[in-house]
Image (cartoon, grey):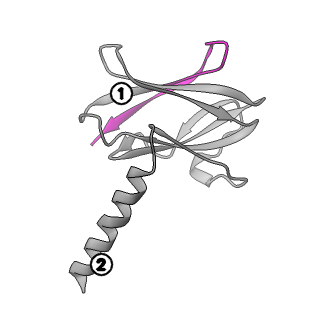
Amino acid sequence: MKKILALFTIFLLIIACSENDGILDNQATSSVPLELSLNTVGIKLASNFVTTEAKMNVRLETADKVTIKIVDLSGKTVSSEIVDAKAGDNVLNVYTKALPRSSYELQLYNSNNQQIGKTLINLL
């Protein structure tokens, strides 16, 4: 029974991963988990230590196209994606499974290429 459950879990993970074409999953939600709540414009991670994804809240004053960049320690952009974000809270999952274990900086830019926020993540 444990083997069947393990195989089913792996199958669901494979399906979930294959349905996402990019690094981001924008979850339109009206409620933000407490660990991601923000009082000001910017970004907040659930944890700086991640394995396969970094869950974060992006808070904006107005709706905008937002660019999320993952930058390695040498300053090279290893991944970048644009997402339509609404005014207020936007809970995003940034998928990091394809990246080597290291530290990275998540950078957030608005449509005018102004940096809104940045934070470090450590892939375990």
Q: Which residues are magenta?
A: 106-124
- Classify residue 25 as left or right of residue 103: right
Image coordinates of residue 49 in percent, x first then y, are 36, 42
| Residue 119 % position (x, y) | 48, 28
Dot 2 surroundings within 10 Å: few (below 14), some, or many (20 or more)? few
> Which residue is farthest bottom?
1
Quickly name the residue at label 2: 5
Badge number at residue 104: 1
42 over 29 or under it: above or below? above
* Label 1 or label 2, whichever comes before in sequence order: 2
Residue 112 marker? none
Q: Is residue 61 left or right of residue 28?
A: right
Report helix, strand or loop for mark 1: strand
Quick one: 39 or 96, which is closer to the camera?
96
Q: Is residue 55 above or below residue 110?
A: below
Residue 109 on the magenta span: yes
> Identity of the amino acid at label 1?
Tyr
**Quarter occupied by the N terminus:** bottom left
Q: Tell whether 43 sits left or right of 123.
A: right
Residue 114 location, x and y as percent?
63, 13
